[in-house]
Amino acid sequence: MNKFSVLSPCKINLNLSVHGKREDGYHSLTSVFQAVSLYDRIHITPDESREIKIRGDFDCAPEDNLIYKACSLFVKEAGIKHGYTFEIDKKVPQGGGIGGGSSNCAFVLRALNEYYNYPLTQETIMELGLSLGSDVPFFLSSPTALVQGRGELLSSLKTRTDYTILLINPGIHVSTARAFSLLAEKRAYTPKESCDINAMVSQYQKSPIKFWTLKNDFELVMDSDYTFISVIREALLASGADFVQMSGSGSTMYGLFTAQEDAEKAADRLSVNKMYKINIVRPIDSFPSIERF
Ligand code: C5P
């Protein structure tokens, strides 16, 4: 049995409209997700043991790790009788609204399915992914997507690659559940009927980035409770960003720059704050495949 590895990218939300609570307790949303070039590397060593071992810098018990859960579901569904050691070289900040855990989960499902020459259909992989998290199906689809429902309704979009992204993680953990309850308290949902999806997609695809009016509902309501949002927003705008937004339910903020050197200068300027984890990344237009050793 050969070792193999896969890169697991993260994402940003270019907009995020939340439309209210559904009967199943989740919220329905509309968002353009973009995968970006900051990756964890997941090394996978199969063996005959039937045990799943996780090695890496995680803040949860191995059994609670989405990699463990994804692997357990996969082997059960595919009827495979192997064990695995997963070693994760973690580069994506955890709990930052950029989908690191969801991506690890999806890329383990993708990698195992590719390694065994696709025993499970894409539909089954999607179902397994959705059962583990709302953002997982995106990482099983395409690197730029319009995402609706609770995260399972996906339409691929053509990737724009004419910008560089400066990611700023302020090192503050924002709970997703807390972010959703703030939205409910402030009744700040975007009504579905006022969300013109065609106009939004057309803006993403056609307008110069500096004219985008895309919004994140979470950022709008969290601004008064979390001061880092306006501090980073102002700093990015003062450094020449064409567009600034929070990703997901935070805490990662990002700036989009049409010139890479402007992003680099902004990164230098913002790096005086030692609390910030800063990464310069690019939108990606294809998802990684496995590498076999
Ligand atoms: O699906 P996931 O585990 O990522 O969701 C974490 C929490 O975020 C859920 O328990 C729910 O409270 C909230 N959530 C939601 N609506 C969504 C996605 C997440 O209410 N579409």
Image (tube, rainbow, N blue to C red):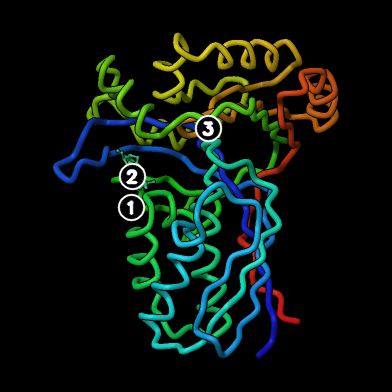
Amino acid bearing label 2: Gln
Could you tell which of marks 3 and 2 lies nearer the N-terminus? 2
Kindly identify which residue carries mark 2.
Answer: 148
**In which image quadrant can residue 209 be found?**
top right
Tag 2–tag 1 contact (CB < 8 Å): yes
Image spot of residue 146 (x, y percent): 42, 45
Image point (71%, 26%), residue name: 276
Local crowd at mark 3 within 10 Å, few (<14), some, or many (≥20)? many
- Above or below — where is 291 with respect to 105? below
Residue lying farthest front? 61
Kindly identify which residue carries mark 1.
Answer: 153
In this picture, residue 287 sits left or right of residue 216: right
- Above or below — where is 1 with respect to 267? below
- Above or below — where is 85 with respect to 22? below
Local crowd at mark 2 within 10 Å, few (<14), some, or many (≥20)? some
Image spot of residue 72 (x, y percent): 42, 73
User: Residue 247 bears which disc, if any?
Assistant: 3
Amino acid bearing label 3: Ser
Which sits in the foreground, 257 or 204?
257
Q: Using the numbered discs, state the Cα–Cα distance from disc 1 to disc 3 in whole angstroms.
A: 19 Å
Closer to us: mark 1 or mark 3?
Answer: 3
